[in-house]
Image (tube, coloured by chain):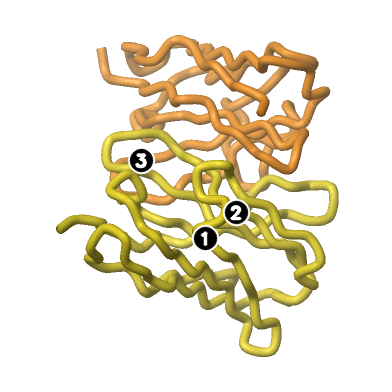
Chain colours: A yellow, B orange
Amino acid sequence: EVQVVESGGGLVKPGGSLRLSCAASGFTFSSYSMNWVRQASGKGLEWVSSISSSSSYIYYADSVKGRFTISRDNAKNSLYLQMNSLRAEDTAVYYCARDRGVGDTFSDYWGQGTLVTVSS
Amino acid sequence: DIQMTQSPSTLSASVGDRVTITCRASQSISTWLAWYQQKPGKAPKLLIYKASSLESGVPSRFSGSGSGTEFTLTISSLQPDDFATYYCQQYNSYSRTFGQGTKVEIK
């Protein structure tokens, strides 16, 4: 069974840092592109970042470019999001999601999310 | 960036109704469009990809159509489990964008 499980969320002060992790199982992690998508309370979905299977291609939303870094460790079946210079507007549930495949860059499996709260 | 606009934002309907949600792209995205269903406190669930392909396990009452800039998600006969928020997402460009969502409420 395909599973992705996020962790690492919590309360952080503005300007602080946080690292999210996503543990994947039930599929060959090293063959799939992965993504982070976030959702502020009561708001819609916002794509944050994507990384290709071998980390050759990395993309960010303009809202996080220069502050967030996506990475992966295929040996550990894990995806990460390093978040620096956090702002109040980064407060959201962060989802880890798997792409269907090369050329099929929509997300077919999602985790349950981890909540990040940026507040003083 | 490609902007995605859904309409309506909220839709009130009854069990058994035929429901249609529209998604418009600010530029042509061919058929690179997905639809997701989200219930409160839950992760999004993939319903439709490539504008009209039904994801495995999704009931056949869900269907998608369209190409270019205009797309629709149709629920042929609304069931109690279908009351949720629906999002379209374009994946024509690396910067994937979602529509703002359509909440389907009980009338």
- Which residue position is annotated with label 2? A49
Specify whether B75 is left or right of B72. left
Quadrant location, the C terminus of chain B: top left
Q: Which corner quadrant of the image does residue A97 belong to?
A: bottom right
Crowd around label 1: few <14 · some 14–19 · many ≥20 (10 Å): many
Quadrant location, the N terminus of chain B: top right
Q: Which corner quadrant of the image does residue B15 belong to?
A: top left
Residue A53 percent coordinates (x, y): 77, 68
Secondary structure under the numbered disc 1 in the rendered image: strand
Tell me the subunit letter for badge 1: A
Q: Nearer the viewer, mark 3 or mark 1?
A: 1
- Which residue position is annotated with label 1? A68
Residue B67 percent coordinates (x, y): 78, 17
Q: Distance between the Cα atoms at labels 3 and 1?
A: 28 Å
Secondary structure under the numbered disc 2 in the rendered image: strand
Are tags 3 and 1 found on a single chain? no
Q: Which mark is residue A40?
A: none
Q: Residue at (43%, 10%) from the top-left corner? A: B8
Residues under numbered marks 2 and 1 in contact, where contact means CB atoms less than 8 Å apart: yes
Specify whether A79 is left or right of A74. left
Q: Which mark is residue B39?
A: 3
